[in-house]
Image (spheres, grey):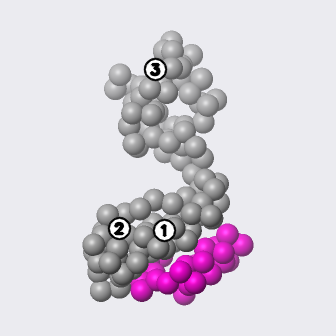
Amino acid sequence: MEFLINSLLDIQNRYGYLPKEELKRISSKFNVPISRLYSIATFYSAFSLKPPAKHKINICKGTACVIKGSEVLEDAIRGYVDGVNLGYEPIRCFGACSMAPVVVIDGEIHGKMTISRLRKLVERGLEGGSTKT
């Protein structure tokens, strides 16, 4: 099984996800049912069956950020997340509680976030502009 996991990790690192065509190739190469590969890919969180989003947003779910409104921010971006342009993943804590609520967009940290500022940053990023403030 280790050789399968290593092969899948190589593909994941190359493409950012596990394309169906690559899974078929591995299935044929190692004479392993494709259902076994899907079983491995869905069990381990290191693997994704979807292409990565063009933009990535993280909202802190730590205590200070939740108290300062991160859940409201999370609700505000749900309409933007479509799996292709914008991928969302909550993070437990960034360790920047004095800047709460904290949002990270494409690796850029934004503190003391508001709904209107978040919407502007996301829209600017989706239009191809920078999300830096």
Q: Within 10 Å of the Cα at label 1, are there few (<14), some (14-19), or many (20+) other Cα atoms?
A: many
Question: As shown in the figure, which amino acid type bears the numbered disc 2?
Answer: Lys
User: What residue did someone put label 3 on?
Assistant: 36
Q: Mark 1 points at which residue?
A: 74
Query: For the C terminus, which image quadrant?
Result: bottom right
Q: How far apart are marks 2 and 1 (CA)?
A: 9 Å
Q: Tell me the number on the disc at residue 61.
A: 2
Residue under the image location 30 percent in, 70 percent down? 62
Q: Distance between the residues labelled 3 and 2?
A: 35 Å
- The answer, for residue 54, to whether it is visible in the render is no
Residue visible at 60% across and 78% down in the picture: 119
Q: Is residue 119 magenta?
A: yes
Near-viewer residue (89 or 75): 75
Q: What element carries label 3?
A: helix
Q: What stretch is highlighted in magenta?
A: 106-133
Q: Which of marks 2 and 1 is nearer the N terminus?
A: 2
**Which residue is found at the position 56% from the left and 84% from the top?**
117
Amino acid type at mark 3 = Arg
Mark 3 in CB contact with mark 2 (< 8 angstroms): no
Callout 2 crowding tier (Cα within 10 Å): few <14, some 14–19, many ≥20: many
Quarter of the rendering containing residue 99: bottom left
